[in-house]
RNA sequence: GCUCCGUUAGUGUAGUCCGGCCAAUCAUAUUGCCCUCUCACGGCAAUGACCAGGGUUCGAAUCCCUGACGGAGCACCA
């Protein structure tokens, strides 16, 4: 099976589906995965040189490795060879009709005058195309199918066209005559021994077009299935490479890994495991209808993977400072993980003030339990220890909240899909390492990104 | 306009090919209860679907027809 990305930019979340599915099938049926970069359009879908590696990296993140990696732009001579073969079989002809003219003829089921030209003339003109003697738009090589086919999409489609702009890859910069997807992909699928093709419904007619090619060459067409588009809830940004690129250029997104971007790089930075994404993609199946993937499914799968390993910390966002008085402990020592006593406890020293989230503030005169520390009563003087024991909580009268000490807590920027929020975390949060997953109690899981002098940065993964 | 394809709970999915075992599976979501010094994890429960109408049949989510709705292609993009 093959994954045939166009390296015209880093991947968005929808792209994860292909490697997820074919990687899973490959493992299940002992198959092989080819990653073929279909980079045959230096103009409209111009390859991005950084994207080649970024895509391979994304595949690895999703939990797979391609058995073989090839680039269509390295194989142009091969495509020329098969084009010559096709012309010899009288299966293709050069055509100088302007696109619009041909389109009108085609739609009324009429052949253009070039269709009847001889093999020799087409061959000569094709060689001239290869030699770059034409400019873009002047000439194309068409596959002779059935000009009266009831489906207009299949009538004499274009196999090669001229492109003036050099390919960004140095190795391919000299070519001016480029194959279209249907030709290139069709030839490659056969040559590389692809047995099963999975692709989007937008390419439904592709298989039908390529069958004409396979017919001429006497090849057997692979099994092919088409799936619908994936949309993901939870994002305001449309899942489109060009759209995301645009938003980054205008500065509305910080980059491909901005938490608001529906990209692989983004969820990766948030600490979502590639395998969680893969599993969610697998469960979507391969139906031809459009599907909506709920991010909550991805989160649920990720939570299964990270909950056990994520130590707990307190983070207070937009903290409100409250004085603390009365007779209480000097420090709280809550467990690092409620299910793993052996990991020990955190130490949170407290002096005479704490920060709590504004929404957690109890009403005047009411009690609240500062987790790990004790019960306090709120008044205009601040919090005062009441000396109640934990039964106050067990009996249901007092809510438990998280908090941080005013002294010693560390500033944290929490980057989320809804924008950044600022807060302070308990002192030991400073000891976590970049890339570590933590759970901010009563907030959710986050990936530690960096500890800088001014503030620490964490990326919010999910509740 | 021409040509394809699809429609099971909020979301995804199983079942549809070979009609009965389907008063429809599983996951996720939501809600409630239990556990708990987190609104995590875990346990229990509840909610919620076969697009519509005809036909065939003893029997239809499953077969046939019509309609509605949705998607895709008809590019010198992939």
Image: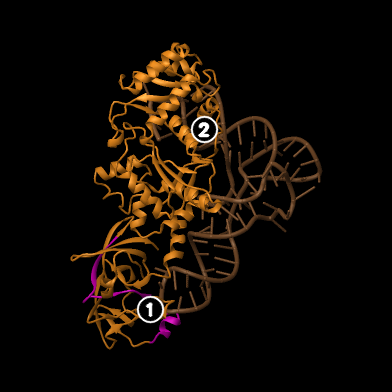
Chain colours: A orange, B brown
Residue A107 placement (x, y as % from top left): 48, 18
Q: At 23% from the left edge and 71% from the top edge, which residue is drawn?
A: A410
Q: At 44% from the left edge and 64% from the top edge, which residue is drawn?
A: A305
Q: Are marks 1 and 2 on the same chain?
A: yes
Q: CA distance from mark 1 to mark 2?
A: 57 Å
Q: Is residue A401 magenta?
A: yes
Chain at numbered mark 2: A
- Check disc 2 and report the residue beneath it: A207
Viewer-closest of A270 and A320: A270
Mark 1 and mark 2 residues within 8 Å of each other at the beta carbon = no
Residue A275 placement (x, y as % from top left): 44, 57
Viewer-closest of A274 and A72: A72
Give the residues drawn in magenta, as a range.
A389-414
Using the image, determine if residue A364 lies above or below residue A167: below
The tag on residue A343 is 1
Classify mark 2: helix, strand or loop. helix
Using the image, determine if residue A385 lies above or below residue A133: below
Quadrant in the picture for residue A37: top left
Crowd rating for badge 2 (residues with CA inside 10 Å; few <14, some 14–19, many 20+): many
Quadrant in the picture for residue A412: bottom left
Q: At 49% from the left edge and 47% from the top edge, which residue is drawn?
A: A32
């Amino acid at each position: 099976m093959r994954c045939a990305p166009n390296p015209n930019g880093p991947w968005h979340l929808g792209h994860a589906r292909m490697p997820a599915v074919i990687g899973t099938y490959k493992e299940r049926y002992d198959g092989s995965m080819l990653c073929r970069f279909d980079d045959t359009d230096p103009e409209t879908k111009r390859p991005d040189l950084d994207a080649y590696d970024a895509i391979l990296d994304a595949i690895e993140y999703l939990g797979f490795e391609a058995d073989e990696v090839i680039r269509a732009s390295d194989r142009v001579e091969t495509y020329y060879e098969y084009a010559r073969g096709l012309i010899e079989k009288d299966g293709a002809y050069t055509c100088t009709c302007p696109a619009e003219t041909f389109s009108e003829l085609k739609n009324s089921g009429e052949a253009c005058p070039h269709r009847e030209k001889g093999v020799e003339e087409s061959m000569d003109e094709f060689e001239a195309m290869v030699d770059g003697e034409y400019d873009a738009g002047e000439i194309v090589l068409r596959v002779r199918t059935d000009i009266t086919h009831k489906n207009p999409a299949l009538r004499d489609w274009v196999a090669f066209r001229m492109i003036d702009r050099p390919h960004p890859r140095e190795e391919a910069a000299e070519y001016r005559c480029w194959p279209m997807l249907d030709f290139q992909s069709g030839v490659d699928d056969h040559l590389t021994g692809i047995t099963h093709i999975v692709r989007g419904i937008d390419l439904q007619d592709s298989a039908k077009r390529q069958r004409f090619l396979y017919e001429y060459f006497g090849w057997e067409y692979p099994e092919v299935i088409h799936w619908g588009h994936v949309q993901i809830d939870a994002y305001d940004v449309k899942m489109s490479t060009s759209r995301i690129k645009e938003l980054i250029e205008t500065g509305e997104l910080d980059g491909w890994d901005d938490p608001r971007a529906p990209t692989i790089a983004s969820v990766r930075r948030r600490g979502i495991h590639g395998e969680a994404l893969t599993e969610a993609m697998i469960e979507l199946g391969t139906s031809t209808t459009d599907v909506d993937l709920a991010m909550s499914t991805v989160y649920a799968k990720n939570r299964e993977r990270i909950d056990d390993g994520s130590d707990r910390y307190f983070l207070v966002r937009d903290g409100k400072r409250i004085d603390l008085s009365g007779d209480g402990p000097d420090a709280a020592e809550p467990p690092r993980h409620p299910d793993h006593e052996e990991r020990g406890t955190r130490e949170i020293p407290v002096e005479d003030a704490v920060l709590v989230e504004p929404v957690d503030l109890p009403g005047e005169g009411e009690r609240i339990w500062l987790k790990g520390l004790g019960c306090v009563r709120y008044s205009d003087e601040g919090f005062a220890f009441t000396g109640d024991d934990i039964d106050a909580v067990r009996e249901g009268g007092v809510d438990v909240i998280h908090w941080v000490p005013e002294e010693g807590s560390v500033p944290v920027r929490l980057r989320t899909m809804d924008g950044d929020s600022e807060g302070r975390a308990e002192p030991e949060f400073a000891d976590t390492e970049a890339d570590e997953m933590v759970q901010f109690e009563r907030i959710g899981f986050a990936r530690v990104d960096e500890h800088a002098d001014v503030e620490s940065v964490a990326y919010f993964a999910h509740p």
